Image: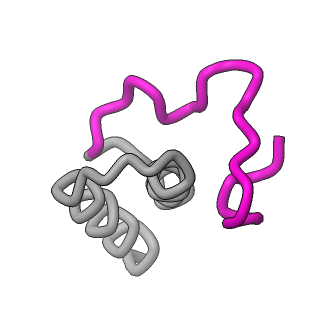
């Protein structure tokens, strides 16, 4: 499976659960947070609070050195 973020038009579900399933939001990597956001958008899961938390994780993980 390609990274879900590589093609925002189509979500190709993995054969096995994604690496981020079951992980606490604070333990997600930037790539995993992006994959969750793409998954939520592709499946029309409109949880605004969760999306904001994931976006914050994505920003903090991608800007920290």
Q: Is residue 61 left or right of residue 51?
A: right
Color scheme of the displayed model: one colour
**Given the current orientation, which residue lies at the most extreme left position?**
49
The quarter of the displayed image where residue 55 is located: bottom left
Instruction: Answer above or below: position of 10 versus 45.
Output: below
Q: Which residues are magenta?
A: 1-25
Q: Is residue 35 left or right of residue 9?
A: left
**Given the current orientation, which residue lies at the most extreme right position?**
1
Instruction: Answer above or below: position of 35 versus 56.
Output: above
Is 13 a magenta residue?
Answer: yes
Instruction: Answer above or below: position of 55 versus 27.
Output: below
Q: Indicate the position of residue 33 as horizontal and vertical percent values.
A: 44, 54
Q: Indicate the position of residue 52 as horizontal and vertical percent values.
A: 23, 64
Q: Is residue 22 left or right of residue 42?
A: left
Name the dominant secondary structure of the magenta segment. loop
Number of marks in the image? Answer: 0
Which residue shows up at 31% across the image and 62% down it?
57
Which residue shows up at 29% across the image and 43% down it?
25
Quadrant housing the C terminus: bottom left
**Given the current orientation, which residue lies at the most extreme front position?**
44
The quarter of the displayed image where residue 1 is located: top right
Q: Indicate the position of residue 45 as horizontal and vertical percent values.
A: 38, 47
Is 31 a magenta residue?
Answer: no
Which residue shows up at 69% across the image and 49% down it?
11
Which residue shows up at 44% across the image and 51% down it?
44
Q: Indicate the position of residue 4 as horizontal and vertical percent values.
A: 68, 53
Q: Is residue 9 left or right of residue 27?
A: right
Q: Nearer the viewer, residue 8 or 56?
A: 8
């Amino acid at each position: 499976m390609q990274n879900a973020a590589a093609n925002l038009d189509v979500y190709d579900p993995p054969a096995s659960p994604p690496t981020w399933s079951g992980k606490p939001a604070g333990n997600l990597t930037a790539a995993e947070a992006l994959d969750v956001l793409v998954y939520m958008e592709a499946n029309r899961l409109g949880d605004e609070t969760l999306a904001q938390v994931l976006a914050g994780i994505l920003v903090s993980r991608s800007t920290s050195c």
